[in-house]
C-alpha cells in the first residue's frame, strides 16, 4: 500500500510537473516572506529548561526577590593607581545611573558614599588600632604632604627626608625601597607616555589592587542575538565621553553573566560567512559526485532550499520564537534532509542506466526507494520527537522542528518536487551505473572472512566497554567559552575576587535572623570561603571604633583642613627634581644595600624628567599630586563615620540583601586556595555538596549548573530510550522479522559504543554542547542501516560496490560537511560539538558500510 501510494505521488508530480513546481515554489516564497516578517530569536538561555522543576523554581524565586542581582554586568575599572580607579568608577557609575533606558540598577560593591564615610568601621579592632598608630606617627609627613601636595613639594620632602632623618638613622634607605621603586616606575611610565599614577593607598596596603567595580543590571533585548550588546556599548560610550582614559589612565572591561553570554553568541557567529561559503561549495561538490549532472544538482539543491525555507516557517508557527538550541535545526536539515534527495537521485540514476526512458526510470526508482526511504524518515523523525517528553525544553523544540521538517517536508519534497524538476529539466541518460566498482575486492574479502571479521569486531568493541567508566561530563559552562574574549579574560584576572562571584550560591531565607543562623553554620564548612548577609554591613564594636576614629580625626584635623600652598613655577619644579636626584645619588653611595638600587633608579628618572618637556612634568604632576589629593580627601571623609544600624543602611544596599516583606539573602562563596583555579570542577563539586548538606535550599552558581547538567543528561538518556523503543517498534511493523530488527539495531548500538569509547581515548569529555551528538547518532545511523537491511531483504549482494553504498557515503559526506564546519568555530563549545558529531558520523558510516554487510552475510533465499 505504501509503495503504491508513493508511486502514484511520483507519477502525479511527473504528469503535472510545471504546476507542482510552481505550487511548491510559491509555498516556499510565502514561507520565506513569513520567516522574514516573523523571525525572532530568544537568546535567553534560562528558558531552555522547563521551569516546573524544584531547583529552577528556587532560582526563579531568588531572581524575583532580588531582580537587581540577576543577569548582571560587572564593569571593572582599572587604572595605574587605586585612587584613580575609584574616582573613574564613581564618575562612571553616576553617569550610568541616569541612563535608565539601558540600565535598571547601578551600584558599586564596597564603594560609594556609604563606604567612603564608614569604611574604617569595617576593619577589625586590631587592624584599626594599627592603622591609627601609623597615621598618628606619620602626622608630620602628612602635614607637609597636605601643605604642598605638588610635584615640587614632594621632591623637596624627599630631599629633606634624605638630608636629616636618613643621616641620623631615623629612616633607613632599605625601608624606603618600595616608595622609591614605585615612584621611579611612575616617572618612567610618564616619560614613556603611558598611563601613570602613584598609589598612596598601595604604599600603606601593598595588596591594594588598582581597580574598582560597578555592578550593573542592563535592560536586555532578547529579540537581539546579543541581548545586552546595546547596554555594553552604552557603558563604553559613557566611559569615552567622560574621558576616563585621558584623565585617569582608566580602562573599562566588562564581564559577568550578561557579557559572557553575549560574547559567547558573538564567538559562535565569528567566521560564519566563510564557513557558510565553504560548506556551500563542498555540498555542491558532493552533489556532483552523487548525481554527475548540473541539472540534477540544481534539482536536488532547490529541493533542499525549498524544504529548509518551509521548515523554518513551520518551526516559527509551532514554537513562536527560536531559541539558542532550536536554531540548530537548519544545520540538521541540511545534513540529514538532503539524504533523501540523494537516495532518490542515485536510485533514479541506477534505473536510468537500465531504462533509457526518464519517466519509467522515475517510477521504478519510486518503487524501489519507497519502503526504505519512508522507514528511514519515520525512524529519524521518531528519534527527534523523543525529546518532546523531556524537561530539556530547548532540545524538545529542536526535536519538534527537526522531526516535522524531516517527516513532513524533506521526505515529501524529495518525492514531489524532485521528480517534478527532473521531469522538467530532462537530464541526460546514464552512461554507467552508479557505485564504487573499485570496492569489489573489499566485497570479496569480507565475504571470505566474514566470521573472523564479525567476531573480531564484536570482541574488540566489548573489550573496550570498560573505557566507558572513564567517560566524563564537564558541567562547567566556562570551559565552553572562548578564553580570548574580553569578558573571559577579565573574569580570569578576577580569579578569587569576591566581586566576580561567578561561583557564588545563594539561599533565600524567610527572615534576616534565619539567614544569620544559616550563615553561622555555613562559615564552619572548610569548603566555604565567605558567607555574606545584610548583617555583614553592620560593623561590630562600633562604639569603640568610633571613639578611636574620633581621636584620630582630632589629631589630624588641622593637618587635613589646611589650604595647600600656591602652585610653583616650572623652573622651581625643575630645581626641586634635580636636587632630589642629587640627594638620591648621594644616599645610594652612602647607604649601599637593599634601597640603593631603587634610589639610583629614581635619581636617573628624575634627572630625565627634569630635562624633558614641560608637558611631561605636568603629566608627572598629575600622576603624583593627583592621586595624593584624592588619597587625602578620602582620608578626610573616612574620619567622619557615624553609627550604623539596619535602619540607617542605604536603601539601595539594603534592597540587595532584604526584600520589602522581610526575606533575606545569604550569599556563599567557595574557598579558593592561593594559586588554585576558580573553575576546578572537583573543588566546585565538593563545595556544592558541602553547601547542600548544610542548606538543601541553596541555589545558583555551580549548584544550578550541576542541576542543569543532571537535567540534560537525564533528558538525553530518556530521549535515547524513547528513540530506541520507537525505532524498534517502527522496524518491527515494517520488517515483521525480529532478526532483521536486530540486524538494524546492533550496528547502531555498536557505532554508539565505539563513538563513546573513542571519545574517552581522545579525552573528549561530554558537555552541554556536544552531548547533542548522541541522539543524532540514532537519527542519522538508523537511516543508513535501514537502507542496507531492505536491500539485503530484496536479495541484493556485493553491497559495498553498489549504488546504495555510493549514495550513503556521499549523503554522509554532505552531513559531515554540515557538521564538520562546526569544528572550525572559534567557540570551544560549538567546536567540541562539531568534533563529536563528526566522530559519531564516521563511526556510524563505518558501522553501516562495513560492519552491517558482515553482520547480515549472504541474502536469504
Image (cartoon, helix red, strand yellow):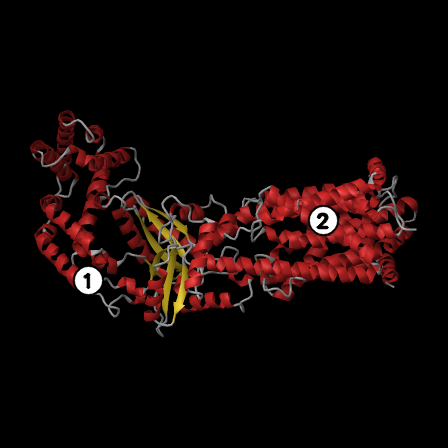
Q: Secondary structure at mark 1?
A: loop
Q: Earlier in the sequence, mark 2 or mark 1?
A: 1
Residue 564: where, in percent of width, then height?
Answer: 11, 47
- In the picture, measured across the screen, residue 76 lies left or right of residue 832, that is left
Label 2, label 1: how far apart the Cα atoms are? 70 Å
The residue shown at (10%, 52%) is 556
Residue 489: where, in percent of width, then height?
Answer: 43, 45
Q: Is residue 711 above or below residue 296?
A: below
Local packing at callout 1 (Cα closer than 10 Å; few below 14, some 14-19, many 20+) is: few
Residue 484 circle label: none
Local packing at callout 2 (Cα closer than 10 Å; few below 14, some 14-19, many 20+) is: some
- In the picture, measured across the screen, residue 536 lies left or right of residue 478, that is left
* Number of numbered tags placed on the structure image: 2
The residue shown at (68%, 57%) is 309
Residue 451: where, in percent of width, then height?
Answer: 81, 42
Residue 541 circle label: 1
Q: Residue furthest top?
A: 589
In depth, the one of 809 and 627 nearer the eye is 809
Residue 381: where, in percent of width, then height?
Answer: 72, 59
Q: Decide if residue 474 is in sight here.
A: yes
- In the picture, measured across the screen, residue 18 lies left or right of residue 550, that is right
Q: Decide if residue 814 is in sight here.
A: no
Q: Secondary structure at mark 2?
A: helix
- In the picture, measured across the screen, residue 196 lies left or right of residue 227, that is left
In depth, the one of 143 and 21 nearer the eye is 143
Q: Residue furthest bottom?
A: 661
In depth, the one of 461 and 168 nearer the eye is 461
Q: Do the residues under discs 2 and 1 have CB atoms within 8 angstroms?
A: no
Quadrant (top left/top right/bottom left/bottom right) for the N terminus: bottom right
Please give the residue where the numbered disc 2 appears in the rendered image: 750
Amino acid at each position: 500500500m505504501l509503495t503504491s501510494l508513493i508511486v502514484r505521488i511520483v507519477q502525479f508530480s511527473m504528469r503535472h510537473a510545471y504546476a507542482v513546481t510552481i505550487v511548491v515554489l510559491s509555498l516556499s516564497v510565502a514561507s520565506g516572506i513569513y520567516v522574514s516578517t516573523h523571525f525572532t530569536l530568544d537568546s535567553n538561555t534560562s528558558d531552555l529548561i522547563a521551569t516546573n522543576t524544584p531547583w529552577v523554581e528556587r532560582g526563579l524565586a531568588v531572581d524575583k526577590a532580588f531582580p537587581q542581582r540577576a543577569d548582571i554586568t560587572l564593569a571593572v575599572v582599572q587604572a595605574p593607581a587605586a585612587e584613580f580607579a575609584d574616582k573613574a568608577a564613581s564618575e562612571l557609575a553616576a553617569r550610568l545611573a541616569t541612563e535608565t533606558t539601558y540600565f535598571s540598577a547601578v551600584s558599586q560593591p564596597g564603594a560609594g558614599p556609604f563606604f567612603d564615610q564608614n569604611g574604617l568601621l569595617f576593619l577589625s579592632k586590631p587592624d584599626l588600632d594599627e592603622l591609627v598608630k601609623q597615621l598618628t606617627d606619620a602626622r608630620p609627613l602628612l602635614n607637609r604632604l597636605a601643605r604642598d601636595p605638588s610635584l615640587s613639594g614632594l621632591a623637596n620632602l624627599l630631599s629633606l627626608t634624605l638630608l636629616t632623618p636618613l643621616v641620623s638613622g631615623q629612616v633607613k634607605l632599605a625601608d624606603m625601597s618600595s616608595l622609591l621603586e614605585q615612584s621611579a616606575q611612575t616617572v618612567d611610565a610618564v616619560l614613556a607616555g603611558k598611563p601613570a599614577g602613584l598609589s598612596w593607598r598601595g604604599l600603606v596596603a601593598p595588596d591594594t589592587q588598582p581597580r574598582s567595580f560597578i555592578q550593573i543590571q542592563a535592560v536586555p533585548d532578547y529579540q537581539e542575538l546579543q541581548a545586552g550588546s546595546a547596554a555594553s556599548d552604552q557603558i563604553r560610550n559613557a566611559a569615552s565621553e567622560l574621558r576616563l582614559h585621558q584623565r585617569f589612565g582608566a580602562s573599562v572591561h566588562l564581564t559577568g553573566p550578561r557579557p559572557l553570554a553575549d560574547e559567547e553568541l558573538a564567538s559562535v557567529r565569528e567566521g560564519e560567512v566563510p564557513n557558510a561559503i565553504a560548506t556551500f561549495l563542498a555540498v555542491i561538490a558532493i552533489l556532483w559526485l552523487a548525481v554527475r549532472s548540473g541539472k540534477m544538482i540544481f534539482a536536488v539543491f532547490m529541493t533542499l532550499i525549498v524544504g529548509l525555507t518551509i521548515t523554518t516557517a513551520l518551526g516559527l508557527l509551532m514554537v513562536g520564537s527560536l531559541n539558542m538550541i532550536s536554531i540548530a535545526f537548519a544545520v540538521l536539515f541540511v545534513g540529514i534532509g538532503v539524504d533523501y534527495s540523494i537516495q532518490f537521485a542515485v536510485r533514479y540514476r541506477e534505473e536510468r542506466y537500465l531504462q533509457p526512458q526518464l519517466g519509467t526510470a522515475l517510477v521504478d526508482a519510486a518503487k524501489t526507494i519507497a519502503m526504505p526511504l519512508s522507514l528511514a524518515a519515520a525512524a529519524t523523525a521518531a528519534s527527534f520527537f523523543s525529546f518532546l517528553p523531556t524537561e530539556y525544553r530547548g532540545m524538545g523544540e529542536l526535536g519538534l522542528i527537526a522531526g516535522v521538517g524531516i517527516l513532513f517536508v524533506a521526505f515529501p519534497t524529495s518525492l514531489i518536487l524532485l521528480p517534478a524538476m527532473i521531469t522538467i529539466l530532462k537530464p541526460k541518460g546514464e552512461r554507467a551505473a552508479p557505485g564504487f566498482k573499485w570496492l569489489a575486492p573489499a566485497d570479496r574479502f569480507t565475504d571470505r572472512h566474514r566470521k573472523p571479521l564479525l567476531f573480531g569486531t564484536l570482541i574488540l568493541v566489548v573489550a573496550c566497554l570498560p573505557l566507558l567508566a572513564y567517560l566524563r561530563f564537564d558541567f562547567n559552562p566556562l570551559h565552553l567559552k572562548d578564553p580570548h574574549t574580553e569578558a573571559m579574560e577579565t573574569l580570569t584576572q578576577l580569579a578569587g575576587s569576591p566581586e566576580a562571584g561567578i561561583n557564588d550560591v545563594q539561599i533565600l531565607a524567610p527572615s534576616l535572623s534565619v539567614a544569620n543562623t544559616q550563615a553561622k553554620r555555613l562559615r564552619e564548612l572548610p569548603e566555604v570561603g565567605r558567607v555574606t548577609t545584610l548583617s555583614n554591613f553592620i560593623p561590630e564594636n562600633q562604639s569603640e571604633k568610633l571613639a578611636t576614629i574620633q581621636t584620630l580625626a582630632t589629631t589630624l584635623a588641622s593637618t587635613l583642613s589646611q589650604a595647600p600652598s600656591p602652585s610653583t613655577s616650572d623652573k622651581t619644579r625643575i630645581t626641586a627634581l634635580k636636587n632630589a636626584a642629587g640627594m638620591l645619588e648621594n644616599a645610594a653611595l652612602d647607604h649601599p644595600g637593599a634601597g640603593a638600587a631603587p634610589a639610583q633608579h629614581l635619581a636617573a628618572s628624575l634627572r630625565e624628567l627634569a630635562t624633558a618637556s614641560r608637558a611631561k612634568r605636568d603629566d608627572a604632576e598629575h600622576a603624583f599630586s593627583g592621586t595624593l589629593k584624592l588619597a587625602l580627601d578620602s582620608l578626610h571623609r573616612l574620619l567622619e563615620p557615624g553609627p550604623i544600624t539596619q535602619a540607617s543602611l542605604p536603601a539601595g544596599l539594603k534592597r540587595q540583601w532584604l526584600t520589602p516583606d522581610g526575606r533575606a539573602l545569604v550569599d556563599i562563596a567557595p574557598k579558593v586556595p592561593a594559586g588554585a583555579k576558580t573553575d576546578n570542577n572537583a573543588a566546585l563539586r565538593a563545595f556544592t555538596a558541602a553547601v547542600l548538606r548544610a542548606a538543601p535550599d541553596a541555589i545558583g552558581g555551580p549548584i544550578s549548573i550541576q542541576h542543569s547538567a543532571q537535567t540534560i543528561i537525564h533528558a538525553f538518556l530518556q530521549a535515547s530510550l524513547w528513540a530506541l523503543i520507537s525505532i524498534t517498534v517502527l522496524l518491527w511493523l515494517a520488517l515483521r522479522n525480529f532478526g532483521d530488527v536486530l540486524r538494524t539495531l546492533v550496528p547502531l548500538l555498536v557505532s554508539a559504543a565505539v563513538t563513546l569509547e573513542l571519545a574517552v581515548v581522545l579525552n573528549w569529555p561530554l558537555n552541554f554542547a556536544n552531548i547533542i551528538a548522541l541522539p543524532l547518532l540514532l537519527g542519522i545511523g538508523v537511516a543508513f542501516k535501514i537502507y542496507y537491511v531492505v536491500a539485503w531483504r530484496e536479495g541484493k549482494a556485493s553491497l559495498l560496490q553498489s549504488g546504495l553504498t555510493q549514495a550513503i557515503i556521499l549523503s554522509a559526506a554532505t552531513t559531515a560537511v554540515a557538521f564538520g564546519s562546526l569544528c572550525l568555530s572559534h567557540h570551544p563549545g560549538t567546536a567540541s560539538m562539531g568534533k563529536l558529531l563528526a566522530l559519531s558520523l564516521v563511526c556510524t558510516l563505518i558501522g553501516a558500510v562495513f560492519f552491517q554487510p558482515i553482520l547480515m552475510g549472504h541474502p536469504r533465499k
